Amino acid sequence: MAVAPINKVLEVLNYALTVIPAQKIHLGIPNYGYDWTLPFIQGESKATTLGNVQAVQIAIENHAEILFDQTAQSPYFHYTKNDLLHEVWFEDVRSMNAKFDLIENYRLRGCSYWNIMQLFRANWLLLNNRFIIAKQR
């Protein structure tokens, strides 16, 4: 499934808001994806972590169509390599935008990133376009 499916993020956020004021909540934003080999076997299967740009490069290299899951608000695709089926879930500007909508709609304090070391320029452009960025010390 998606790294941070918006429907599940919303469930956690709705619970958090019952015990924490919105102005104290930073929404966690993932800046990475997962490449799973299928079939998934509980306790045995492990995903490879990859950057969002890397995910798109893999899709291009393997002629995979990038799809978009409306419920999760996340992109994904399938490809076959060495006779193994892979499923890749990652983030793009559409999935980031859905998460940014939660920040605005719920008047949260802001957001924080998981794995800031992956270059994903489109995210920073979108973030800068949507919000006033304040560095905290």
Image (cartoon, rainbow, N blue to C red):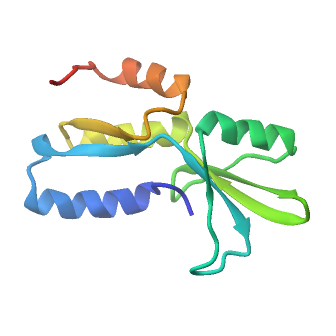
Q: Horizontally, is 65 left or right of 102 in the view?
A: right
Where residue 116 appears, as percent x and y from the top left, is: 43, 34
The residue at the point 38 percent across, 19 percent down is: 128
In this rendering, position of residue 71 left or right of residue 89: left
In this picture, is 88 found above or below 117? below
Query: Which residue is nearer to you in this view: 69 or 113?
Result: 113
Q: Quadrant of residue 82?
A: bottom right
Question: Residue shown at 71%/60% (left/top)?
Answer: 87
For this orientation, the residue located farthest to the right is 83
Give coordinates of residue 10: x percent, y percent: 33, 57
Rendered residue at 79%/47% (across/down)? 65
Spot occupied by residue 43 in the image (x, y as percentages of width and height): 57, 80
Question: Is residue 83 among the parts visible in the rendering?
Answer: yes
In this rendering, position of residue 42 left or right of residue 64: left
Question: Quick one: 38 or 69, which is closer to the camera?
Answer: 38
- Image quadrant containing the N terminus: bottom right
Instruction: Work out whether residue 104 can be spotted.
Output: no
Q: Position of residue 91 (x, y in %)?
A: 55, 43
| 66, above or below 38, in the image | above
> In this rendering, is residue 59 above or below 116?
below
Q: Quadrant of residue 69?
A: bottom right
The quarter of the picture where the C terminus appears is: top left
Q: How many marks?
A: 0
Q: Which residue is pictured at 85% across the width and 39% down the height?
A: 61
Q: Is residue 88 left or right of residue 99?
A: right
Q: In front: 115, or 100?
A: 115
Q: Residue furthest bottom?
A: 42
